[in-house]
Image (cartoon, grey):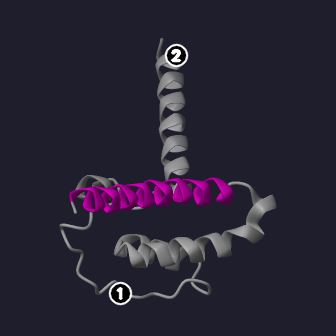
Amino acid sequence: MSTVYHGIKSLQVQTVVMYVGTCCLLQDLKLNMLLAESLPLLAQLLHQLACDLQLQEYVLHYWKDFPFHCPLVTCSLVRHVACCPSIAFSILVFPVHVYSTISQLLLKLIITVVSDLCSVITF
């Protein structure tokens, strides 16, 4: 019985790791408009997995990005502590928004450049 439990737990951890990797793939594909036709199908898959893993923030994230492909649903099932690895789920609290991350990085770069220019001009 112990081996079966560890096998199931290992499978769940691997599922979460695969989910995170696929989330990263979706974010990467968003940056390549030549592959835009693949986005809705991948988003539907991730949306369903987010529902199955009961990751409500991710369900909302996919609905915001693809409202015609991903319905806004509530993950009403209660996650059992014994079956879900808490460490794996702790990295999935909030989804990454690729465009806002890029925007923040560019804003920091602009602020740094302007600050450097101001320091050069004042001397």
Q: Position of 60 compared to 2: left or right?
A: right
Which residue is at the front of the view, 81 or 22?
81
| Residue displayed at 50% across by 22% down | 116
Would you place residue 106 above or below residue 58 in this image?
above
Magenta span: 2-30
First in sequence: mark 2 or mark 1? 1
Q: Position of residue 49 (x, y in %)?
A: 47, 73
The answer for how far apart the CA atoms under marks 2 and 1 are is: 54 Å
Q: Position of residue 80 (x, y in %)?
A: 20, 73
Give the foreground label among 2 and 1.
1
Question: 10 Å neighbourhood of mark 1: few (<14), some, or many (≥20)?
Answer: few
Single out the residue that lies furthest toward the top: 123
| Residue displayed at 66% across by 60% down | 30
SS category of the residue bearing label 2: helix
Q: From the image, tell me which residue sits under label 1.
A: 74
| Residue displayed at 54% across by 37% down | 110
Q: Is residue 37 magenta?
A: no
Q: Amino acid at mark 1?
A: Thr
Q: From the image, tell me which residue sits under label 2.
A: 120
Single out the residue that lies furthest toward the left: 81
Would you place residue 41 above or below residue 18 in this image?
below
Looking at the figure, which quarter contains the N terminus?
Answer: bottom left
